[in-house]
């Protein structure tokens, strides 16, 4: 049994739910409201001194932070991580891309709009994220124009990591109208038997599966 500390409307936390459901792993969820200061409380900082969600408690081991590190830990040895060394390196490449070229623009724009209500004093910052955000979407579009999934033509944690914020990119002001391959990829992921919608559990209440 795993225990996850996360905010249900955070894409980084949603990644963890997606992999747990894909692999049918039992877990408990503790809702953390990042805007109320939950991540700065001593109990949380003891698990992650960086004060960010998600955090995974692993029984008998300790706590693990950083969403993509958690994905790789949970998916190790499963169909979500290729066994071929080159394909596995490509998976890491997409995970690094997600953190450095995608998340800083797509996810942070959504934070400004959805979490903060698009305050006027953040508008210039929001607009500055448009061009690099669309550049990241264009990179994904080129890859998905010839492949069903991002790595090895199979569903992997690379898809999970990038799906989390891409499928709600509109909440940060990004349109996918000019990205048909991404839209088809989103539909393929939503059609998976183990798929869990982002907002089905966004009630800020603990749950157990």
Image (cartoon, rainbow, N blue to C red):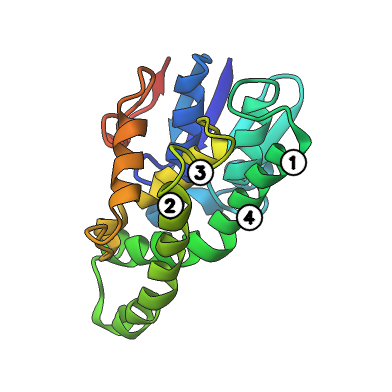
Q: Alpha-carbon distance for marks 3 and 4?
A: 10 Å
Q: Are marks 3 and 4 in contact (CB under 8 Å)?
A: no
| Mark 1 touches mark 3? (CB < 8 Å) | no
Residue 13 rendering spot, x and y as whole percentages: 47, 41
Q: Please tell me whether residue 94 is drawn above or below residue 58 in the rendered image.
A: below
Give the quarter of the figure containing the N terminus.
top right
Q: Secondary structure at mark 3?
A: helix
Give the vertical position of 115 relative to 195 (above or below): below
**Residue at the far front in the pictured view:** 146
The residue identified by callout 4 is 96
Q: Residue at x 45, y 30 (%)?
A: 17
Q: Viewer-nearest of labels 2 and 3?
A: 3
Q: Element type at marker 2?
A: helix
Q: Which residue is mark 2?
A: 34
Q: Tell me if 141 is positioned left or right of 151 in this view.
A: left
Gap between marks 2 and 4 measured at Cα: 24 Å
Camera-side mark, 2 or 4: 4
Mark with earlier residue (1, 3): 1
The quarter of the displayed image where residue 127 is located: bottom left
Query: Can you tell which mark lies on residue 161?
Result: 3
Q: Marks 2 and 3, how far apart in space?
A: 20 Å
Crowdedness near tag 3: few (<14), some (14–19) or many (≥20) residues, C-alpha within 10 Å? many
Residue at x 42%, y 38% (from the top left corner): 14
Q: Is residue 135 above or below residue 198?
A: below
What is the secondary structure assignment of the residue under circle 4? helix
192, 209: nearer the viewer: 192
Q: Left or right: where does residue 11 sit relative to residue 198?
A: right
Distance CA(mark 1)–CA(mark 3): 19 Å
- Name the front one of labels 1 and 3: 1
Q: Tag 1 or tag 4, which sits nearer the N-term? A: 1
**Given this view, does label 4 or label 1 mark the residue nearer the observer?**
1
Q: Position of residue 105 (x, y in %)?
A: 43, 67
């Amino acid at each position: 049994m795993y225990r996850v500390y996360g905010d249900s409307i955070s894409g980084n936390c949603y990644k963890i739910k997606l992999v747990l459901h894909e692999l049918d792993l039992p877990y408990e969820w503790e809702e953390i409201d990042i805007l109320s200061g939950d991540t700065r409380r001593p109990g949380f900082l003891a698990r992650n001194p960086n004060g960010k969600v998600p955090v995974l408690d692993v029984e008998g081991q300790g706590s693990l932070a950083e969403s993509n590190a958690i994905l790789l830990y949970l998916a190790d040895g499963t169909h979500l991580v290729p066994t071929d060394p080159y394909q596995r390196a490509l998976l890491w490449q997409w995970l690094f891309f997600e953190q450095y070229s995608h998340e800083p623009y797509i996810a942070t724009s959504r934070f400004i709009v959805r979490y903060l209500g698009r305050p006027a004093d953040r508008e210039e910052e929001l607009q500055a994220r448009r061009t690099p955000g669309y550049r990241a979407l264009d990179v994904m579009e080129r890859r998905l124009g010839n492949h069903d999934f991002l790595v090895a033509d199979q569903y992997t944690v690379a898809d999970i990591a990038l799906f989390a914020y891409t499928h709600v990119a509109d909440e940060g002001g990004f349109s996918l109208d000019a990205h048909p391959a991404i839209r088809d990829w989103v539909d393929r992921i939503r059609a998976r038997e183990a798929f869990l919608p982002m907002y089905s559990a966004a009630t800020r209440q603990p749950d157990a599966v």
